[in-house]
Amino acid sequence: MIEIERKFLVNSLDYRKESQSKTTIVQGFLNTHPNRTVRIRIHGEMGYITIKGVSNENGTTRFEWEDELNVRDARALLRLCEPGIIEKSRYVVKAGEHLFEIDEFSGENEGLIIAEIELSSEEEEFLQPSWLGNEVTGDIRFYNSQLSKKPYKYWKNEV
């Protein structure tokens, strides 16, 4: 239940050619407290509830618990979420022994593309494809919970 994850900006659309799948995601947050977030997500035809704890100092590791919901319940819970529903398309790309999940945001976060990789340890090495850009792990502006409050369109010129 501990997630170790690194996040990167993406510098080209080349990952699309390497993608194994593309799925639509809609998500909202029931709670965006700094010490915990409670997320409701519809990922394709599945619903999920996820609770995440506070990140460690460098932003790579934190507690995460997730369980499936039926889509009807997930849609109902989305109506209870805080303002700022996030919509994105997720591409999955295999690179070496790892999978990257690349999110292309739409709506108020249009233009933002983030690649995430889950690791088994903070020191684990991984293949870095040419489309992988600057690392943004630990930069809370790029947390989905923060993008729901302060969308990318309001600060994209600062990056």
Image (cartoon, helix red, strand yellow):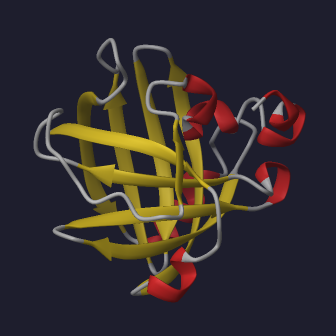
Image point (19%, 47%), residue name: 119
Image point (69%, 38%), residue name: 148
In this view, 108 is above or below 131: above
- Expressed as whole percent of the image width and height from the top left, the position of residue 8 reads 50, 46
Side of 30 relative to 110 (left or right):
left
- Expressed as whole percent of the image width and height from the top left, the position of residue 56 reads 29, 16
In this view, 57 is above or below 49: above
The front one of 46 and 5 is 5
- Expressed as whole percent of the image width and height from the top left, the position of residue 98 reads 22, 65
The front one of 66 and 102 is 102
Image point (22%, 39%), residue name: 3
The front one of 149 and 134 is 134
Q: Quadrant of the C terminus?
A: top right
Side of 123 relative to 59 (left or right):
left
- Expressed as whole percent of the image width and height from the top left, the position of residue 67 reads 26, 55
Side of 129 relative to 105 (left or right):
left
